[in-house]
Image: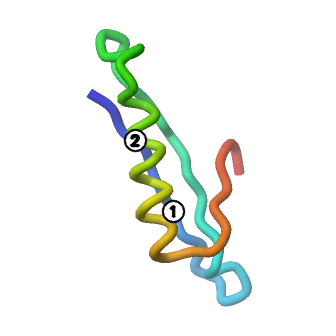
Amino acid sequence: MGMAGLAVYERAKSSHKGFMWGVYVQAGQRGRGLGKRLVRQVIGQASRRVIVLEAGRP
């Protein structure tokens, strides 16, 4: 129904940063709050691993 990606930078100076990418919800599932729930899940996962979460295009 949907997906979202989280990448954590590997370089020592950037390892405190994560990047959210590729948030997608199938056309038939849109308008039901799934995208918002996916983003919240990514934020929750990221908060356990990084200090800074970036979104958008790298």
User: Could you give the CA–CA distance between mark 2 and mark 1, rounded to whole angstroms?
Assistant: 15 Å
Q: Residue furthest left?
A: 1
Q: Residue at 67% of width from left, 43% of height from top?
A: 56
Say few, some or many: other residues with alpha carbon within 10 Å of mark 2 (under 14 / 14 to 19 / 20 or more).
some
Q: Which residue is mark 1?
A: 7
Q: Residue at 60% of width from left, 58% of height from top?
A: 19
Left or right? Give the position of 55 relative to 24: right
Assign a secondary structure to mark 1. strand
Picture coordinates of residue 42, whole percent (x, y): 45, 54
Left or right? Give the position of 43 relative to 19: left
Question: Vertical placement of 52 versus 6: above or below?
Answer: below
Q: Splitting the image into 4 quarters, where does residue 8 fall?
A: bottom right
Q: Residue at 50% of width from left, 40% of height from top?
A: 22
Name the one closer to the observer, 38 or 3: 38
Q: Residue furthest bottom?
A: 12
For the N terminus, which image quadrant? top left
Q: Earlier in the sequence, mark 2 or mark 1?
A: 1
Q: Which residue is mark 2?
A: 38
Question: Vertical placement of 42 versus 12: above or below?
Answer: above
Amino acid type of the residue tagged 1 in the rendering: Ala
Name the one closer to the observer, 57 or 1: 1
Give the number of the disc on residue 18. Answer: none
Picture coordinates of residue 55, whole percent (x, y): 65, 48
Assign a secondary structure to mark 2. helix
The total number of labels drawn is 2
Picture coordinates of residue 3, whole percent (x, y): 36, 39
Q: Residue at 39% of width from left, 16% of height from top?
A: 30
Name the one closer to the observer, 15 or 40: 40
Amino acid type of the residue tagged 2 in the rendering: Leu
